[in-house]
Amino acid sequence: MTLVDVRTPDPKRFIPGATGDWEVIIGMEVHAQVLSKSKLFSGASTEFGKPANSNVSLVDAAMPGMLPVINEECVRQAVRTGLGLKAQINKRSVFDRKNYFYPDLPQGYQISQFKDPIVGEGKIVISLGPDRQGNFEDIEIGIERLHLEQDAGKSMHDQHATMSYVDLNRSGVALMEIVSKPDMRSSDEAKAYMTKLRSIVRYLGTCDGNMDEGSMRADVNVSVRRPGEAFGTRCEIKNVNSIRFIGQAIEYEARRQIGILEDGGSIDQETRLFDPNKGETRSMRSKEDAHDYRYFPDPDLLPLEFDDAFVAGLEKHLPELPDDKKTRFVRELGLSVYDASVLVSEKAIADYFEAVAEGRDGKIAANWVINDLLGALNKIGKDIEETPVSPAQLGGIIDLIKAETISGKIAKDLFEIVLAEGGDPAEIVEARGMKQVTDTGAIEKAVDEIIAANPDQVAKVQAKPTLAGWFVGQVMKATGGKANPQAVQALVKAKLGIEE
């Protein structure tokens, strides 16, 4: 990989040091487990959470004479991901043996791709913001390559006092290693990149993106330099499995390297681990280079070849991706860029919103989904997939507001009832007498009573008409929030002689 600097140094991203400003350079290698029922080169199950060593075939265990057979579905998923990254699809790629020796890799080597990967250069556009003016900054991050490889098993060192155990369930599961170019210049950019990449593979259905289960994790390469100078020596932070931890690891590592350089030292190229409990990185081993792995083409696997028709068939059935969906929400539904960005951040949220917005005002639907539903789910610690309020129920609440059956305030109360108890919103309104009062006679009676009971306040309003809102609030309170707010406001102004 030839390192090319495509970014102009930006002072707002500089890190101040004791001897001047520094710039952090970040590249990422993301390992994303392919969603498929069986492994890359065997028929063993990929189901997560099974008992240790229950998803292991003779191929995964490297029994003598066992030969790998490529899983076509994994190839399809890799190509679909490449298309989602606007990347070059290489119709001929080669599997290589990457030699290293760990107990969680029974073969003594990993089948990977080195010089000829299945996917070449692509790009991801991330958005930072909004700033104080509500603007977003779009930044293009280059993708160097995507290649297919086997995952390793899992070593467990906390199961026995003197021995380590090995679980090979994960061994042989297909991985897509997605390698970025060194185009990121802050921890915020790195977090936005990982968030966007996870969103893309989830939309595509090529990886579930469950970082807590290890199905998506990142090796983060960090170096620092004086602004405008050549790239510095990088350190790799291995297997970071949280977007928040990615940010913390970068912040610590950049500071660590700056401290060493300002003290006159030099950075050793090495692999490090991030300790989230201490919020710091620590040395794991010296960094290997490609020649240390002694790559050579795997003699058991022919080059992987497919034609344009294969790629075109997959491209034809790609889903609408986050950027395209965001553009459509802004253009067709009139949403703000911020609201559209929130709604497309997860496919499940976008799908929910579209179901609510069908045949309704998009802006109103967006406000309810973002502010009320997502806010409530955050409070009770649930994801959108676990929401107690269905799109039909939320849509029903919006319909009742539009029909002026209930007011906005009553709608908030109704939403809380549906969230806690479920049920049909229209039936709840009917059964609990929650309909707003639209009878002008009844509203006028309440207005007259409030005005008659508060002559001092009437005098204040005559001197300062903006205080009329006090009377509106009192009438709403007296009617239990059921009076039509527009009718109340109009009657209060008419009774007090306030001109529009």
Image: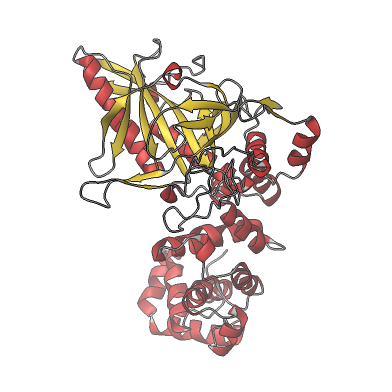
Q: Which of 439/87 is in front?
A: 87
Q: Is residue 135 visible?
A: no
In the picture as drawn, the residue positioned furthest to the front comes out as 64
Question: What is the x, y in percent for residue 388?
Answer: 51, 71
The colour scheme is secondary structure
Answer with the quarter of the image where residue 140 lies.
top right
Answer with the quarter of the image where residue 268 lies.
top left
Answer with the quarter of the image where residue 249 lies.
top left
What residue lies at 63% left-to-right and 73% top-to-bottom? 396
Q: Is residue 130 above or below residue 37?
A: above
What residue lies at 45% left-to-right and 30% top-to-bottom? 28
**Horizontal relation, residue 395 to residue 180: left or right:** right
Question: What is the x, y in percent for residue 335?
Answer: 62, 49
Q: Is residue 39 above or below residue 352?
A: above
| Numbered disc total | 0
Q: Which of 284/257 is in front?
A: 284
User: Where's the C terminus, which quadrant?
Assistant: bottom right
Q: Is residue 13 above or below residue 487?
A: above
What residue lies at 38% left-to-right and 21% top-to-bottom? 288
**Horizontal relation, residue 155 to residue 6: left or right:** left
Q: Is residue 274 visible?
A: yes
Question: What is the x, y in percent for residue 345?
Answer: 54, 48
**Horizontal relation, residue 229 to residue 64: left or right:** left
In the picture as drawn, the residue positioned furthest to the right comes out as 309
Q: Which of 210/467 is in front?
A: 210
In the picture as drawn, the residue positioned furthest to the left comes out as 263
Question: What is the x, y in percent for residue 45?
Answer: 55, 53
Q: Is residue 269 above or below residue 373?
A: above
What residue lies at 56% left-to-right and 84% top-to-bottom? 428
